[in-house]
């Protein structure tokens, strides 16, 4: 059959063609999941600065930023923002006008990426180092979000900008954005928090008399900051309070109101009476995190009989019932014997309502001696961390911290180790699985080396810890053997991820895995690698889970003959797999996203009919697509061709089949 180049083959024709292959003996499909290491971001000159990756979403899309070096005189002339969707890179941000300098300088930065592939960022207005405009890439174009008003009067405090700046903070999967903006002019000064849902821009936070001051320069001073946003469009933040409408000079105790925006109103949260209210009226509460159920973790400051702060109380606020729950770790040493005060603060919150935090410990004289890590599970508060002799100081206390929490309430953290004379800067890493605390590193004989240490980069919902471990002979020698590790209680500590990286990625110049920075829910990882030579010496990469699938090119043709100059399209199929049918894993070909399929050396996209079929009548769905032959980049003498793509969940797929090129007068070669 001959079809004009670029025309679609009717689906019934495609089905008739591939069904010719029913009689072909097709082996059970085996889809083994490995990793593909990719270098997302814009292609640039080798002298460009390394791309830095800020966010990764659940399907493995990555948003980041890079820079272009022009000369010693001009320096980094462009800091570019971009989005990599696994196939192509889209440049983002605001350019031209006030966002591009006379010599081409631009600066766009990334602040967030949601699961819909929308990116939050800001652009620097050229001619100023601290005037910014917030923007959102909505999947189609970059739009300005937040207030934008450049009509400030000239009268202002010396050194302040004439322009209002907008600072992005967070976005959710619906594209709702929160941030804060500074305002200026002869009448007012300070910051306002805001929420922008794409239709309405709402100022949030408190602006009443208690949160307003004035000076000889300004009639009105107000300051509010937005901190976090959940999927329901609810936000948390704080507003600065002023005593008698006066802005204090120099150092002073924080005077802040914690607030919760419920989608309509801004509500005060935290404690503000009794021990939480100083004699002079000072009070301070701060929210830390909010989850999608509207639970908020935070803390409120305690005061003595005067106006001196002497502790904090951790709490959880339930917005559904408008109630606070005080978190009190079961720790006698966490109570100051002199005045009964506690220093307990929240740091982390998960979707199940588990809260992690820290509490100071005291000796009998009321001196601070250490820090206890704790986990609140909604019912009880569990002290965590290592408390054996090597993790206890001369006062009988230690210092521990929870650094990561997953969706099931498992946590990972660190405890400081102590020598005979003083505290060490080295730590022991540990993992709490809900019942037992497991030592990760150092262990065994390495635990006797006071200089061995490490840090944790990620904790997955499956309970896998990813981090870096260091080995050091003594404090006078540099670290050696810094290695990325993975850990589970079942498998123990493994460095295979670093070994696999080194063997796989040598051909691109990255010879060593430096660290894992981010891990998505689907297992995609942002990693940092070392180069042995060249610039830059380090660079961030994407390590994507990949299914190695079986494919059939021209399944009705056992020889897979391809004429590189032909107008005849090529049909390629990805074969599904089922454990029930003898395969080692399941692979649902119906989950392939056709927009991501690329075939041949030139990575041609689908150009004609495509769809789900059952190639060999085994009851397992396969996926077929047609590709314009001359777009594939297949040359004479090529002996194989590769099909790549992604499923809707972001899993990469990779399959290769043999081909035979025909109608070739001379052997071809790729450019």
Image (cartoon, rainbow, N blue to C red):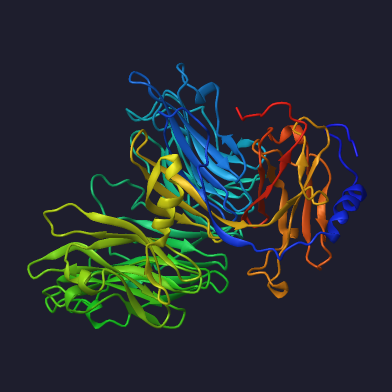
Location of residue 427 by image quarter: bottom left
Name, please, the residue furthest toward the front.
665
**Residue 668 at x, y percent in the picture:** 66, 29
Left or right? Give the position of 412 relative to 175.
Answer: left
Q: Position of residue 603 (x, y in %)?
A: 66, 39
Q: Is residue 498 above or below residue 78?
A: below
Residue 28 seen in this snapshot:
yes
What residue appears at the point 45 percent right and 42 percent down from the top-left corner? Answer: 507
Q: Position of residue 190 (x, y in %)?
A: 41, 41
18 or 100: which is nearer to us?
A: 18
Residue 328 located left or right of residue 450: right
**Placement of 559 over or under 260, stated as above or below:** above
Answer with left or right where residue 246 lies relative to residue 183.
left
Residue 501 vertical placement versus 105 (above, below): below
Q: Nearer the viewer, residue 244 or 641?
A: 641
Work out whether residue 506 or residue 95 is closer to the camera in this orientation and state it.
Answer: 506
**In the shown orientation, is residue 405 left or right of residue 294?**
left
- Extreme residue toward the top, this view: 102
Indicate the quadrant containing the C terminus: top left, top right, bottom left or bottom right.
top right
Whether residue 210 can be seen here: no
- Counting labels gives 0
Tell me the quadrant of the picture where the N terminus can be found. top right
Q: Nearer the viewer, residue 268 or 637?
A: 637
Q: Residue at x 57, y 42 (%)?
A: 84
| Residue 161 against residue 307 in the figure, above or below | above
Q: Residue 145 lies in what quarter of the image?
A: top right
Taking the view exactly as shown, the residue that stands out farthest to the left is: 421
Residue at position x 45%, y 17% from top? 103
Residue 412 position, x and y percent, is 38, 69
């Amino acid at each position: 059959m001959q079809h004009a180049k670029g025309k679609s083959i009717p689906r019934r024709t495609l089905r008739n063609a591939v069904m010719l292959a029913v009689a072909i003996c097709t082996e059970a499909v085996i889809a083994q999941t490995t990793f593909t290491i990719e270098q997302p971001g814009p292609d640039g000159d080798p002298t460009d600065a390394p791309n830095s990756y800020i966010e990764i979403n659940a399907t493995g899309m990555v948003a980041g930023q890079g820079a272009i070096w022009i000369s010693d005189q001009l320096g980094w002339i462009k800091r570019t923002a971009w989005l990599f969707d696994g196939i192509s890179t889209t440049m983002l941000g605001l350019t031209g006008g006030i966002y591009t300098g006379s010599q081409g300088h631009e600066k766009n930065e990334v602040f967030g990426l949601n699961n819909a592939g929308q990116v939050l960022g800001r652009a620097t207005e050229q001619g100023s180092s601290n005037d910014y405009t917030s923007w959102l890439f909505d999947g189609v174009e970059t739009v300005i979000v937040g207030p934008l008003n450049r009509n400030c009067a000239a009268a202002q405090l010396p050194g302040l900008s004439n322009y209002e700046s907008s600072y992005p903070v967070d976005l959710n999967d619906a594209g709702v954005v929160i941030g804060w903006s500074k305002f200026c002019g002869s009448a007012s000064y300070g910051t306002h928090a805001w929420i922008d849902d794409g239709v309405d821009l709402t100022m949030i936070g408190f602006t009443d008399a208690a949160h307003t001051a004035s000076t000889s320069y300004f009639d009105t001073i107000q300051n509010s900051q937005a901190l976090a946003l959940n999927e329901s469009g609810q936000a948390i933040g704080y507003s600065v309070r002023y005593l008698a409408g006066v802005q204090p000079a120099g150092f002073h105790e924080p005077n802040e109101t914690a607030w919760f925006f419920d989608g309509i109103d801004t509500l005060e949260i935290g404690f503000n009476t009794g021990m939480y209210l100083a004699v002079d009226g000072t009070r301070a509460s701060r929210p830390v995190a909010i989850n999608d159920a509207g639970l908020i973790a935070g803390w409120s400051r305690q005061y003595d009989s005067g106006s001196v702060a002497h502790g904090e109380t951790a709490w959880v606020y339930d917005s559904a019932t408008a109630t606070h729950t005080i978190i009190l770790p079961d720790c006698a040493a966490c109570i100051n014997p002199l005045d009964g005060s506690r220093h307990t603060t929240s740091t982390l919150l998960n979707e199940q309502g588990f809260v992690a935090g820290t509490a100071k410990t005291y000796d009998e004289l009321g001196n601070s001696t250490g820090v206890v890590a704790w986990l609140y599970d909604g019912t009880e508060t569990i002290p965590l961390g290592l408390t054996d002799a090597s993790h206890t100081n001369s006062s009988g206390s230690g210092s521990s911290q929870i650094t990561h929490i997953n969706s099931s309430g498992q946590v990972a953290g660190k405890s400081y180790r102590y020598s005979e004379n003083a505290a060490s800067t080295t730590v022991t890493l540990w993992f709490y699985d809900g019942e037992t605390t497991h030592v990760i590193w150092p262990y065994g004989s390495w635990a006797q080396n006071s200089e061995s240490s490490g840090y944790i980069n990620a904790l997955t919902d499956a309970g896998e810890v990813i981090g870096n471990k260091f080995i050091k002979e003594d404090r006078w020698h540099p670290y050696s053997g810094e290695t990325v590790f993975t850990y589970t209680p079942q498998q123990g500590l493994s460095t295979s991820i670093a070994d696999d990286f080194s063997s796989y990625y040598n051909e691109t110049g990255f010879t060593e895995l430096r660290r894992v920075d981010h891990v998505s829910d689907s297992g995609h990882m942002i990693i940092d690698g070392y180069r042995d030579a060249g610039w830059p010496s380090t660079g961030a990469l994407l390590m994507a889970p990949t299914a190695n699938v079986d494919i059939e090119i021209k399944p009705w043709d056992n020889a897979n003959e391809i004429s590189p100059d032909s107008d005849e399209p090529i049909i390629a199929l990805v074969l599904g797999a089922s454990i029930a049918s003898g395969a080692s894993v399941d692979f649902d070909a119906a989950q392939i996203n056709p927009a991501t399929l690329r075939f041949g050396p030139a990575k041609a996209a689908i150009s004609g009919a495509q769809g789900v079929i059952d190639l060999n009548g085994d009851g397992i769905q396969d996926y077929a697509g047609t590709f314009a032959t001359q777009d594939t980049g297949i040359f004479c003498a090529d002996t194989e061709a590769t099909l790549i793509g992604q499923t809707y969940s972001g899993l990469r797929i990779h399959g290769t089949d043999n081909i035979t090129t025909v109608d070739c007068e001379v052997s071809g070669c790729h450019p």
